Image (spheres, rainbow, N blue to C red):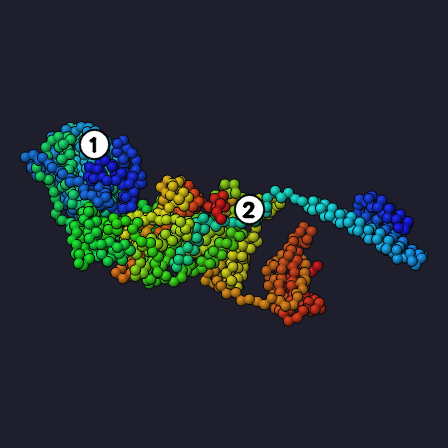
Amino acid sequence: MKISYNWLGDLVPLTLNPQELADKLTMAGLTVEGVEKHGDDFVIDIDLTSNRPDALCHLGVAREVAVISGTTLKPAGIALQEGEEAAEDVASIEILDTDLCPRYAARIIKGVKVGPSPEWLVKRLEAIGQRSVNNIADITNYVMFELGQPNHAFDLHSLQDKHIIVRRARAGEKIKTLDGVERQLSPDMCIIADTSGPIAIGGVMGGEETEINADTTDVLVESAYFNPASVRQTSRALGLSTEASYRYERGADYDSQVRVADRVAGLIAEIAGGTILKGALDVYPQRIEREAVTLRESRIERLSGLRVEIERAAEILTGLQFVVAPFAERRELLAVAPSFRIDISREEDLIEEVVRHTGYDNIRVTLPPWNGEGQYLPGENHRRKVRNTFVDFGFNEAVSFSFVSGDRDRLFRLDDKATATLLNPIDVNEDEMRASLMTGLLEALQRNFHQGRRDVKLFELGRVFKAGRESVRPDERETLGLVMSGEVLSNAWRGSRQIDFYDLKGVIEAVTGSFNVSGFTIERASVEYLHPGQSAVLQRDGEVIARFGRLHPRIASLYKFRQPVFVGEIEFGSLLELATDQVAYKALPRFPGVSRDISALVPDTHSWGDIEKAIRDLGIREIVSVTIFDMFKGKDMPEGLRSLAFRVAYRSDERTLTDEEVTGIHERVRELLEQHFAAQLR
Amino acid sequence: MDEKLNQIREQFLADVSAVNTPEALTALRDKYLGRKSGLIATEKKRVGSLAPEARAEFGNQVNQISAEVEAKIAELNEQFAAKAEAAALEREKIDITLPGTQFGRGHMHPITLLRNRIEDIFVSMGYTVVDGPEIETSFYNFDALNIPPGHPARDSADTFYVGEELALRSQTSTMQIHAMQRMSPPLRVIAPGRVFRRDTPDPTHNPMFFQLEGLTIDRNITMADLKGTLQKFVQLMYGANIVTRFRPSYFPFTEPSAEVDFRCYICEGKGCRVCKESGWVELGGSGMVHPNVLKAVNIDPEEYQGFAFGLGIDRMAARMYDLDDIRLLYENDVRFLEQFN
């Protein structure tokens, strides 16, 4: 909202320069975005909050200025010279739908001369960014920016039967508005009609047919109060926002209709000539009444921490044109808000008025009393630990939009369940809440590949969604996703190698390992979006905690990935439930251990996991660890065999093992390999 | 001095000056100090053939020469060892200007970094972190926050709907309501999280961003406490000398309401790019919890009252990192992410 400093000066004595005034207005809640010199004037640009439509005009700002600077408004002084002819003999008004339009007033001026506006008027409008049209249109505009109330001038002779009907539009009715657009009306819209049909859309825009034109001699000035919600709805439905609708939808003054009509009529007679007919037309069947609100002195301090005497509160409210009845002994007052302050309905609202005009700056600075220790979200330590683990392993943290392309997301869903669909997405291709973090991460991977980055590791910790029953909130689950592709070490000038399944597995093990949970098993598994030969799940007691593996080539080709991509999803929520902070210390070994290596040719059909498990299942207490250190499959090796080399570490907690003892135990391991795994020991 | 000894000494001095390799030194050592056939050992054996009265003097002379030879050889030995060491070190010299191994440490997202910092500060001030669902019912997203049906904030131009009564939460204030339902006053919570608004992405807008809501409810909490709390936060976040400014504002769920600014930490109020030449930086919205909000969760507004505030984490990040296009925050471009530590 642009305010002219000079114009303001017509309404209230100005004791502050434009910049000082701007600062004070800001601190009173009318945020000034900027002050600009404009000829011999200054334009103050105010960013008003939506609760203050009363200040969308010079008078509204002047009212604040008066209280800020301790002055009083200059008297309005609208003196009208009325003619003999009575307005009610010329035109009539009827409101059929008072819920949409509680009040409609009008003035009639005859014998005007439409023409250009005088220079002062053009300058005023120009200063606040308004273009001059003609004297009549400029005056209606001027008065809106002065008093805040939108109003409209009709060419009286274009009104069929000079009878104005305010009503809901009928299905199928149309109107060509002032902007030349033909608009389809619907029955929830409030229109102004004459006996032949719509002539204006109430509170939004007038019609072309009844527009003021060069030949207009007689004018009917409309000054009405429209229901805010109705205007908002109509404006949205038509996609038409105007200065008028902007004000009406926020809430106009319901009591200034006649005053505004008078002001417009007075200016028209003064500038465009003509005679003002006697009397204003004013249809206002159901008076709008405001309730008085009590303000307690004690409550001001209790809420704001600022001590303000009830007398001072009364002064501020009176200055803001509230009707105030003070009760000094009870340290209270009763206040009725003025008709333009639609934002006031309770004690807290009055307190804000008093406090903002006393100055938020004057409120002390204290801290609330101690109320116990603060706490992080449950599991926050693990969230932070997991992030650190990923970062240590070279992953960058991604944050993706929660809504994604459903087509892509469905590739990664484990069941057919929907998630939640946006009814009004920005992009129709991204209208579903994600069921998997894969969707966002693979899109990010793709984007990075396009940028020429071939070595990318990303993880994300966030929620995924799963539909519940109808009209019930979908389930939200916190999960971890990761993607990795390219070289293990990027830019390694001494050589590196491509990331493979085991790198992924190592990351999964490290991340899940930090939760102090035992009993995880990793097994080959079939996951639809993963390569069938390079995929696994990590489980505990049959519950899947993580799925991971190489992205299925079929899906990789959808993304046009030309290098292997490894992905994983970890059920972070499940891990959190299992997590413990307890670590039981195990005594350090007191006796030395011995290691023996085994090298063997073993049929491919036996997995390392099976061999390792079988050794452990021997149940030999002295076996401390079984560690593979080489796996080799070569051309010169018989088909279907591979060479495994591993180390078995032996130790007793009771004594130092003798060479014979170790040899005896080790022989059992060798026998196991030969007998159960058809191993050729070397 | 014994003539023979003197001869040996002279010869040694001549020999030693010609030694220029460790091998030659070893040979020299063997020649003079060899236990059996070394020249000095041979001389020592001569003592028996001397007159008894001359023996002591001869012994002295032999020992003297022996010590002199040993010292000289030791000195040379040391010189050769030092040379050898220097040569070895020189051989192991490498080009230290080649790049260090890229272990490729990753980076946390700037939003995470900032969010952790903010959470740490508020937890240290006695706040408990809470959360709530990202898909909300109209009750939590609007009704309980004093945003009645028909209010512009409910418009489908601004809010993403997933059903008649379900929307993506458009502010973290929803979690105030959950917190007040779950816990009874006095309470002190913060609620960080994702929120969604139907804004087409541009350099200053994203349809998803992060906010942090704060709430304090007790019997006698005032706006002075609100000022003190946010002032403390700003000082812990941006520096001990930073001052705040509270301006009257409007939010449906607070009354009175205040917009909070703080003195620009870059220019200290002189005006710069970060504060758009105003000297002040916007922190967020705040105010005293509206009585209708308290009533919606069955808290008696005559008995309890409190303040709430909301911070935009993305906007704080944009300022902190001088980010001129916040769309980068959610594009997950590694070149961007790698810049944050």
Tell me the residue at 46%/60% (across/down). Answer: A576
Q: Is residue A78 visible?
A: yes
Q: Quadrant of residue A585?
A: bottom right
- Can you give x and y, in whole percent of width and height, for residue A258 in the image? 13, 41
| Chain at tag 2 | A
Count of numbered marks:
2
Decide: few, some or many residues near mark 2? Use Cα within 10 Å; few <14, some 14-19, many ≥20.
Answer: some
Q: Is residue A220 above or below residue A471?
A: above
Tell me the residue at 40%/61% (across/down). Answer: A373
Does A79 sit left or right of B285 as displayed?
A: left
Q: Quadrant of residue A279?
A: top left
The residue under label 2 is: A486
Q: Is residue A297 above or below residue A152?
A: below
Q: Tell which residue pokes out farthest to the front in this image.
A: B53
Which secondary structure, mark 2?
A: loop
Q: Is residue A184 visible?
A: no
Does A360 sit left or right of A560 as displayed?
A: left
Q: Is residue A116 above or below residue A91?
A: above
Does A560 sit left or right of A210 as displayed?
A: right
Which secondary structure, mark 1?
A: helix
| Chain at tag 1 | A
Q: Nearer the viewer, mark 2 or mark 1?
A: 1
Tell me how far mark 2 sits from mark 1, CA to CA.
Answer: 70 Å
Q: For this rendering, which residue is in front, A192 or A602?
A: A192
Decide: few, some or many residues near mark 1? Use Cα within 10 Å; few <14, some 14-19, many ≥20.
Answer: some
- Can you give x and y, in whole percent of width and height, for residue A187 in the image? 21, 44
Say which amino acid is labelled 2: Gly
Q: For this rendering, which residue is in front, A282 or A471?
A: A282
The residue under label 1 is: A121
Which mark sits nearer the N-terminus, 2 or 1?
1
Q: For this rendering, which residue is in front, B53 or A132?
A: B53
Tell me the residue at 93%/56% (across/down). Answer: B50
